[in-house]
Image (tube, coloured by chain):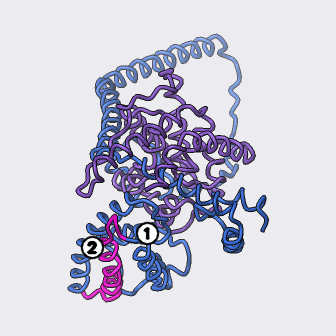
Amino acid sequence: MKCDECAPLLDDFLYNQTDGATEKALAEHLHACDSCAREYALLRREQELYARTEVEIARDFWSGVQARIATETRSRAQGFAGLFSALRFAPVAAIACLLVVVGAVGLWRYFSARSDRLVTAQIPQAPRVGVTITSEKSVPETKTVKSDAVRPFRLVSRSSSRAYARKIVKPVPATNEVVENKPLSADLDADSARHLEQVEMLLRSFKNGRHSNTLDLTYESGLSKDLLARNVLLRRDAELSGDEPLTRLLDQFEPFLVDIANLRDNSDSKEIQNVRERLTKSEIIAAVHSF
Amino acid sequence: MDTIRLAGKLGTFAQTHQRGAGGLLERAQQGDEEAFSLLFEQYAKPISNFIYRMVGRGDLAEDLAQETFVRAYRKIRTLHLHDGTQLSTWLFSIAKNVVRESFRSRRMDQNKVGIDDVLPVSVRNDEPAPDERLWNKELQHMVQQGLQTLDPDKRQVFILRVFQQCSYEEIAAITGYSMPKLKADLYRARTQMRDLLRPFLEQSNEV
């Protein structure tokens, strides 16, 4: 690899966004070329400085988001309620309209019938002609099929619409592999499923991350502690209920959660790399993903 | 669960949260607020950082970041991820639009950043020594001021690349810019920021 090929790829290399062959070629070139190696070192130092300027968010940030969403949902519901309150006189108004319409139709029929009688009276000798209507026309039979998938639109409360939506949505596994690997005893409850998702996310994040600054470790270490505590409880429950596959899986998590929880801001990169390599070798992430 | 296709390698953050999010996404689209929180709470810090670096004011950044998530909640029902589009890309696009609207409506002077506008770092038990804290604060101020001297296009690209480590493809999807423009903007932004950072680079060498 030449310098002019290497230079544009340095930041891809820094962010671990190169493929295997390119990464190898870049590493070899940086080993051999002082000028590119200096440029790369400068990029890394800049990146370390920028990482120091990362800001933390307020602890109540997310509760602020939730409050705003809740306010918006409430005001939407109040809008509907307002609509309903405006329509509370609707039945009375509807009945009044119906009476008016019925009265109007009745009057129209009365007067049109009266004018017919007058016309008939004026032509007393007109022959009566009967018209026979054959009723052989075939009306295609329409089959009414009740479909659960199609329902008339109606206003429902959020909770019942959610229940309704849940009813018609059937969870479909993405691949056959997942179905075949599904353990016999596992119909996971919501808590266990959520826990597995969060552990998978943490382990994947840790395995793939480049820990060039200390702030990331603090967050992941804290999260790992929380997940570890929950893991212990869920494992115990799984043991008591005789769910062996789940027990085994949760058991496999604990060493990794302990290691990540124990990592501190002054842990050296070897320690971090060690945990990452064990994560890769154990294939725990693939196991939880297919569970 | 993996119904979303990935386009090339992602930044660490997006890759972490893309897989395993399929079920949560469906639930969030059906109005499940808990699923929405589980899915998006992890993006709170990156989005806040992105917006803060764009607007340069802590109070405004928090407000705009919250607005980003509220809009995401409104729009998620009609979200269709396709052709390798990522959830993070979609969210950053919303953030970008929120910032742009803020620029238009508030007509901020984008070049002025006061030392007090710098967002505080959270207090931890293992906080750095006071002189290091001051150095960090000065660095943060310099970086923020430097970012405000970049025009918004370059600033956006620089923040997404350097601070969020998004790939060029992701940045193109978020901003709508072409690859040549992205790379040119990034090169110019890096050069400009490097000049400002030179004193800190030299000091960090000495440490």
The numbered disc on residue A125 is none
Check the image and report above or below for B103 versus B190. Answer: above
Specify the amino acid type for callout 2.
Answer: Leu
From the top left corner, tell me how far across and down residue B98 is, in percent.
50, 34
In the rendered structure, the answer to whether residue B99 lies left or right of residue B82 reads left
From the top left corner, tell me how far across and down residue A8 is, in percent.
72, 56
Q: Residue at x 44, y 20 (%)?
A: A101
Specify the amino acid type for callout 1.
Answer: Phe
Q: Nearer the viewer, residue B183 or A148?
A: B183
Q: Specify the quadrant of the image occupied by residue A182.
A: bottom left
From the top left corner, tell me how far across and down residue A221 is, in percent.
32, 66
As drawn, the chain in blue is A
The earlier-in-sequence mark between 2 and 1 is: 1
Q: Quadrant of the N terminus of chain A?
A: bottom right
Secondary element type, mark 1: helix
Q: Chain of mark 2?
A: A
As drawn, the chain in purple is B
Q: Nearer the viewer, residue B94 or A33?
A: A33
Check the image and report above or below for A206 versus B162. Answer: below
State yes or no: residue A123 in magenta: no
**Which residue carries the number 1 mark?**
A206
Range drawn in magenta: A242-267
Q: Residue at x 67, y 74 (%)?
A: A20
Q: Specify the quadrant of the image occupied by residue B157.
A: top right
Q: Residue at x 30, y 41 (%)?
A: A64
What predominant SS class does the magenta segment belong to? helix
In the rendered structure, the answer to whether residue A122 lies left or right of residue B136 reads right
User: Dot 2: few (<14), some (14–19), or many (≥20) neighbours within 10 Å?
Assistant: many
Check the image and report above or below for B149 versus A14. Answer: above
**Which residue carries the number 2 mark?**
A228
